[in-house]
């Protein structure tokens, strides 16, 4: 990080990527724009600060599942299902229980009187009760029948309570209406319910209520008499009040659990600790730059806050400075960060191109979350609830696992997926967090020219840049592996290694003599075994005494023309690039400056490579494979903090066995590839399974064939679903009257009398079958499954790409 806030663009041979001498001067008091370019409109829940950029910064971005557009995301709240029987439905069994209890107390149940006559002599009938015992021979004794009466009251009352409690999920009701209340309110509600229940248990303690007591205390006293056969114990004041206390505690216990009285009491009675006043403890809006203030950078935070509220910063500036702050905190360079911010303000760490935004945006971007919105998830019964109606978005967290998109021509792959993703990566490159290489299909460039820093137009004489076929490599073996992958990687899976060895046997000796790798015409002559190319090279090596390279060249000469020689197919493929239209390209001394793809490992560059026009399809595939091989070599460079992405608008003939193995390693190298195919048939059949397994994100557009859909269906697997089967069976009657009624019913309805048998079971079914993918995906839609670099999955869901 430089103190002046600029970065150079080394890594492109002798000529750097063109950029202005410095970022343009930004006036300090311009008129505030109505909305910063490209910033999404603020949601209704967002605050209304002085600028739209501040509102965009302060908008909540909750953590969401992969693929959800997080800007202003508000998941739909599902109303909690209280119980199978609602509160209104539970009032009916409560009313029935009250009616049954009234009838019981009035003696309308016959077995109640039978109990009394069984256990009570006739002369004691209506003679007294436990409350008002009858004097017998000068002493007061409770009647035995009254004891059983109170016990029967207790049993019947408990049965009614259990019956009412079994008819509904009272726990769910309490959790729905009470548990969501704050702690003080929850404790008060529980206390009020406890007092209400105690008023029924001990009505004498609440004068003026006028309702009957619940049969709890006296039945317990009567039960004690039956068990102990001791009237003195029941008459004991100590025992009576002890029983009152036990009953009170039993009543209060469930309400104490409901209101969390004990934890709340411990919290209230805990010793008060002196509160330490920490600066910036309350939550502050993001437009106030709280992370900088927490790190002690108050001056920088104040300056950036004034820039944001004054409308002098856009979303790219905010994301770029946050990325720079994260880098400075990681590298312990906060002092340089502070100096740069104070000297340049919102223009600090401007992209090497000097651009602070792109001229036009065709998609919605959220640079804080690193996402681009591509559509909306369609509500479906198998879709998780957070995805219902939410926006569909892609970002580096999912692109880091690579994405494979398959759809026929006209299905919208380029317009709805490739172009928004390319634009998002290009905008993120201006923040310093991303580098992108986009390979356009023939005749259809991706995005405008002002969206990229480097544009390589293969076969166009007006191209400013040329593509280095060796990617600035100094190792002959590495250069030979990349070139062999491009030339013959698609021919078979066993000859790539021999082709790389044959190329290395020529590249090493040539570099030892000339200090550079050969141009493609020179390499073609060496592969064909031309004497005018091999003899001078052999003599130069012999004169220099380089015996190792002499042995390499002699081995290649001995293999030339033998059966199975790898030089012949290499020379034939190389002839496709040794055409007059490509005379000034691939390092042949043309007007364009040689560009190395390794530059993306050091700088957040935006590169576009335009393939040659129609008539050179096979050459375009060779170039695409070469770019893919060089991209894999470039991202292996260590110390890269930014994300690197390669976008292939047409990956036909690009996927090879070696490239599939390299794609699997990209997620650990902070890089990813987007592959767009018209059909999976453009990939060798032996690589279908490995390719689907190598990528973490898969996308099937509308119009795919059942053959392509079967590959997606196999990859996405199956899930357990509930199915309901209804079988109708004819009813055969045995009784004459029943047969007569069935005959009349059949004559009136015209159908036999049947009965239905409903069977509900779980079956394992494909998430998306090949037929559904081929025929049930509407136009403008696609089925997308995502996987993040952390391993979080999103199932294959239908996404509407039109909104």
Image: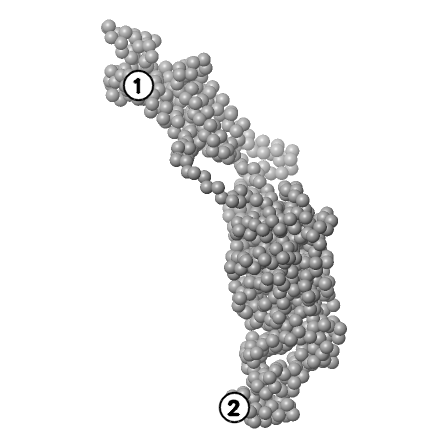
Element type at marker 2? helix
- Residue 577 x/y as whole percent: 68, 78
- The relative height of residue 234 versus residue 333 in the rendered view (above or below) is above
Q: Earlier in the sequence, mark 2 or mark 1?
A: 1
Q: Quadrant of the N terminus?
A: bottom right
Q: Badge 1: few (under 14), some or many (20 or more) residues near its Cα, within 10 Å? A: some
Q: Residue at x 47, y 31 (%)?
A: 184
Mark number, residue 531: none
Q: Nearer the viewer, residue 202 or 601?
A: 601
Which of the two discs, 2 and 1, sits closer to the camera? 2
Q: Residue at x 47, y 33 (%)?
A: 183
Q: Which residue was labeled with disc 1? A: 240
Q: Residue at x 55, y 65 (%)?
A: 640
- Residue 541 x/y as whole percent: 57, 91
Q: Residue at x 54, y 37 (%)?
A: 80
Q: How many marks?
A: 2
Element type at marker 1? helix
Q: Badge 2: few (under 14), some or many (20 or more) residues near its Cα, within 10 Å? A: few
- The relative height of residue 106 versus residue 347 in the rendered view (above or below) is above
User: Viewed as shown, does residue 125 lie left or right of 792?
Assistant: left
CA–CA distance between discs 2 and 1?
113 Å
Q: Nearer the viewer, residue 766 or 656?
A: 656
């Amino acid at each position: 990080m430089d103190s002046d806030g600029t970065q150079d663009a080394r890594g492109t041979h002798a000529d750097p990527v063109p950029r202005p001498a410095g970022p343009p001067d930004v006036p300090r008091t311009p008129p505030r724009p109505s909305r910063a370019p490209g910033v999404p409109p603020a949601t209704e829940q967002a605050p209304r600060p002085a600028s739209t950029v501040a509102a965009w910064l302060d908008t909540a971005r909750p953590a969401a599942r992969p693929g959800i557009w997080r800007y202003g995301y508000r998941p739909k709240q599902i109303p909690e299902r209280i119980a199978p029987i609602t509160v209104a439905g539970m009032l009916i069994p409560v009313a029935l229980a009250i009616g049954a209890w009234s009838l019981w107390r009035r003696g309308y149940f016959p077995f109640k009187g039978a109990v009394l006559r069984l256990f009570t002599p006739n002369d004691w009938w209506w003679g007294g009760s436990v409350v008002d015992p009858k004097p017998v021979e000068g002493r007061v004794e409770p009647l035995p029948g009254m004891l059983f009466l109170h016990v029967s009251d207790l049993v019947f009352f408990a049965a009614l309570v259990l019956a009412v409690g079994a008819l509904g999920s009272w726990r769910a009701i309490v959790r729905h209406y009470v548990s969501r209340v704050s702690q003080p309110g929850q404790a008060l509600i529980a206390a009020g319910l406890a007092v209400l229940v105690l008023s029924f248990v001990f009505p004498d303690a609440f004068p003026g209520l006028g309702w009957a007591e619940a049969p709890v205390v006296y039945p317990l006293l009567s039960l004690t008499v039956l068990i102990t056969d001791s009237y003195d114990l029941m008459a004991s004041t100590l025992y009576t009040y002890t029983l009152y206390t036990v009953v009170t505690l039993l009543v209060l216990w469930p309400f104490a659990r409901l209101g969390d009285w004990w934890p709340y009491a411990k919290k209230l009675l805990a010793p008060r600790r002196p509160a330490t006043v920490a600066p910036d403890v309350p939550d502050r809006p993001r437009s106030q730059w709280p992370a900088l203030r927490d790190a002690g950078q108050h001056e920088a935070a104040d300056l950036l806050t004034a820039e944001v509220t004054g409308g002098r910063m856009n979303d790219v500036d905010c994301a770029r400075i946050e990325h720079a702050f994260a880098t400075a905190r990681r590298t312990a360079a906060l002092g340089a960060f502070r100096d740069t911010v104070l000297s340049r303000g919102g223009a600090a760490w401007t992209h090497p191109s000097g651009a602070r935004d792109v001229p036009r945006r065709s998609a919605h971007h959220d640079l804080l979350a690193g996402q681009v919105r591509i559509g909306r998830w369609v509500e479906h019964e198998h879709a998780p609830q957070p995805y219902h109606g939410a926006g569909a978005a892609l970002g580096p967290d999912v692109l880091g696992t690579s994405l494979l998109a398959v759809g026929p021509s006209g299905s919208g792959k380029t317009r709805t997926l490739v172009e928004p993703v390319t634009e998002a990566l290009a905008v993120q490159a201006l923040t310093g967090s991303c580098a992108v290489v986009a390979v356009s299909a023939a005749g259809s460039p991706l995005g405008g020219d002002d969206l990229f820093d480097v544009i390589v137009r293969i076969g166009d004489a007006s191209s400013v840049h040329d593509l280095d076929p060796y990617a600035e490599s100094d190792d002959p073996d590495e250069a030979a592996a990349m070139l062999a992958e491009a030339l013959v990687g698609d021919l078979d899976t066993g000859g790539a290694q021999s082709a790389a060895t044959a190329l290395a046997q020529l590249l090493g000796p040539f570099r030892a003599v000339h200090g550079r790798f050969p141009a493609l015409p020179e390499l073609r002559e060496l592969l064909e075994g031309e004497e005018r190319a091999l003899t001078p090279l052999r003599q130069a090596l012999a004169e220099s005494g380089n015996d190792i390279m002499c042995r390499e060249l002699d081995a290649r000469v001995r293999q030339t023309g033998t059966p199975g020689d790898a030089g012949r197919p290499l020379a034939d493929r190389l002839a496709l690039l040794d055409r007059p239209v490509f005379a000034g390209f691939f390092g042949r001394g043309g007007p364009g400056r040689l560009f190395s793809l390794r530059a993306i490992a050091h700088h957040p560059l935006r590169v576009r490579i335009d393939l040659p026009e129609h008539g050179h399809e096979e050459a375009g595939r060779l170039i695409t494979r070469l770019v893919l091989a060089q991209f894999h070599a470039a991202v292996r460079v260590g110390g890269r903090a930014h994300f690197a992405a390669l976008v292939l608008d047409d990956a036909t003939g690009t996927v090879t066995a070696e490239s599939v193995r390299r794609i699997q390693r990209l997620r650990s190298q902070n890089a990813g590839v987007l592959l767009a195919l018209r059909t999976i048939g453009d990939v060798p059949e032996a690589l279908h399974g490995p390719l689907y397994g190598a990528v973490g994100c898969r996308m099937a557009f509308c119009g795919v064939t059942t053959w392509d859909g079967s590959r997606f269906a196999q990859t996405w697997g199956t899930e357990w679903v509930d199915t309901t089967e209804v079988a109708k069976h004819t009813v055969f009657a045995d009784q004459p009257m029943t047969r007569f009624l069935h005959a009349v019913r059949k004559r009136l309805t015209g159908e036999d009398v049947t009965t239905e048998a409903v069977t509900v079971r779980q079956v394992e079914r494909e998430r998306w079958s090949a037929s559904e993918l081929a025929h049930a995906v509407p136009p403008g839609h696609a089925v997308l499954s995502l996987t993040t670099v952390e391993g979080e999955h999103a199932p294959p869901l239908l996404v509407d790409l039109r909104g």
